[in-house]
Amino acid sequence: IPLTDDMRRFDDLDFVLKEGMAVIVSGRAAVYTANGTFQLYCNTIQQEGLGELHIRFERLKEKLSREGYFDAEVKKNLPKNPERIGVVTSETGAAICDIINVIRRRNNKVDIVLYPALVQGEGAYKTVIDGIKYFNNKKSVDIIIIGRGGGALEELWNFNEEALARTIFELKTPIICGIGHEIDFTICDYVCDLRALTPTYAAIEATPNIEDMYKHLSMLDGLLKSNMKYITMMISM
């Protein structure tokens, strides 16, 4: 069916209709018997090949982007030497094991506090909201990690909920998202202060390596002693 200018754009579409585009239409058809004209009255139109969840994801992503939720200037800086890290994830999943192991290996001086949350299933995002709000309101941690292992879009959907995205944006405590595998993207990844490729990388990004810190302190100590020796020599001359 050739497209007219009126047909190319609808107020509730998040894409522009083009000639040759395959779409899925729901509505009703009618034939004008006077001249045999066939008419199609559309209620909804979506691009073929895009699932409903993917369409919802893109719509929310575009909406929050327009509102400035992803802008670099609103991202909070991560503390360089956190003393306590809050983790919001399942208490039985692989993600918490990976996070604890990496943090302990990199810096055993950092305290880890877990808020057990659901990471899959209907309404699971509400427990994630409760967790990050708990840490933020208590002001008991320096960084919050939201973590979860990989999965299909449906399994990760709780991290695409608008309520969770808006909560992350509003809180004062810096938040790192380590959700899924490297190829997985959720709305939380875009709105958080730092997106990590996996829960393991989230732990790395949150924690300074204590060995590197000791090496840096040793270098500063050597530099200080060298300068003091030089100053003492100059005074004695």
Image: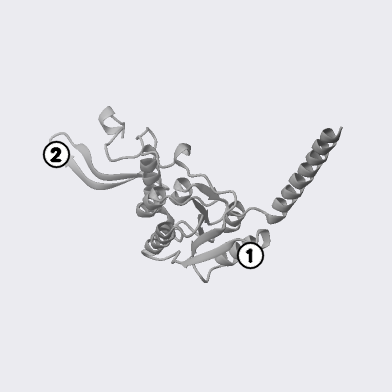
Q: Which residue is mark 2?
A: 33
Give percent across and percent down for residue 210.
68, 56
Between 111 and 16, the residue placed more toward the observer is 111
Q: What secondary structure is found at the residue carrying circle 2?
A: loop
Q: Is residue 193 left or right of residue 165?
A: right
Between 194 and 66, the residue placed more toward the observer is 194
Give percent across and percent down for residue 144.
49, 56
Q: Quadrant of the N terminus?
A: top left
**Residue projecting furthest to the left:** 34
Q: Which mark is residue 195?
A: none
Give percent across and percent down for residue 184.
52, 52
Q: Earlier in the sequence, mark 1 or mark 2?
A: 2
Amino acid on which the number 2 mark rests in the picture: Thr
Q: Which residue is mark 1?
A: 101
Residue appearing at x 76%, y 49% in the figure: 218
Q: Is residue 192 above or below residue 2?
A: below
Q: Quadrant of the C terminus?
A: top right
Residue appearing at x 60%, y 65% in the figure: 100
Residue 215 in sight here: yes
Residue 120 placement: quadrant? bottom left
Q: Nearer the viewer, mark 1 or mark 2?
A: 1
Between 107 and 188, the residue placed more toward the observer is 107
Residue 131 placement: quadrant? bottom left
Amino acid on which the number 1 mark rests in the picture: Asn
Q: Is residue 72 left or right of residue 10?
A: right
Residue appearing at x 36%, y 64% in the figure: 123
**Residue projecting furthest to the front:** 236
Residue 150 in sight here: no
